[in-house]
């Protein structure tokens, strides 16, 4: 079993910053891509940013230049530094990771794992 636990959400004024963290634990042999998604009330979940195990990143156009995704492979942790926050960034933010619990040669298979979400509210 694998758990992803997010932290760092909260209430911040427009123009402010927050740093989200997501730590993966449990039966983990390897982690491929990790990422952050968000879902605002009444809207579909959308990709915010992803990062590969090698450090290649991808961002939604709406957050480019303001958000930075990073990861610590030794700690199985991914971060999202959010600067210049806007009210439209308000959403529940979810961590995602592609997990391999045991080697493929002994029957392991990659599967997606999700965190429980952390709320980010940008308001004055």
Image (tube, rainbow, N blue to C red):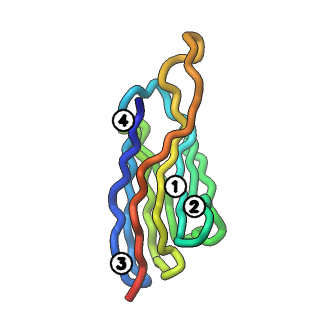
How many residues crowd around disc 1 within 10 Å: few (fewer than 14), some, or many (20 or more)?
Answer: many
Q: Disc 4 to disc 1, how far (Cα)?
A: 17 Å
Return the x and y of residue 60 as percentages of the image width and height.
63, 64
Crowding near the residue tagged with mark 4, few <14, some 14–19, many ≥20 C-alpha atoms within 10 Å: some
| Pointer 2 with pointer 4, Cβ within 8 A | no
Residue that label 3 marks = 12
How far is disc 2 from disc 4 in space, using C-alphas? 22 Å
- What is the crowding at mark 3: few (fewer than 14 residues within 10 Å), some, or many (at least 20)? some
Residue under label 4, please give it: 25
The answer to which of marks 3 and 2 sits earlier in the sequence is 3
Q: Earlier in the sequence, mark 3 or mark 1?
A: 3
Q: Dot 3: what SS?
A: strand
Mark found first going from the N terminus, 4 or 1: 4
Q: CA distance from mark 3 to mark 1?
A: 19 Å
Residue position marked by numbered label 1 in the rendering: 36
Q: Is residue 6 left or right of residue 110?
A: left
Report which residue position mark 2 lands on.
Answer: 48
């Amino acid at each position: 079993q694998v758990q992803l636990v997010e932290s760092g959400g909260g209430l911040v004024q427009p123009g402010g910053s927050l740093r989200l963290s997501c730590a993966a634990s449990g039966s983990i042999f390897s982690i491929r891509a990790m990422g952050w998604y968000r879902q605002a009330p009444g809207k579909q979940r959308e990709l915010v940013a992803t990062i590969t195990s090698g450090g290649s990143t991808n961002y939604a156009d709406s957050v480019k230049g303001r958000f930075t995704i990073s990861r610590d492979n030794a700690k199985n942790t991914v971060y999202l530094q959010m600067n210049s926050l806007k009210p439209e960034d308000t959403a529940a933010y979810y961590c995602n990771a592609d997990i391999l619990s045991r080697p493929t040669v002994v029957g392991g298979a990659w599967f997606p794992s999700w965190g429980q979400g952390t709320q980010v509210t940008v308001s004055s």
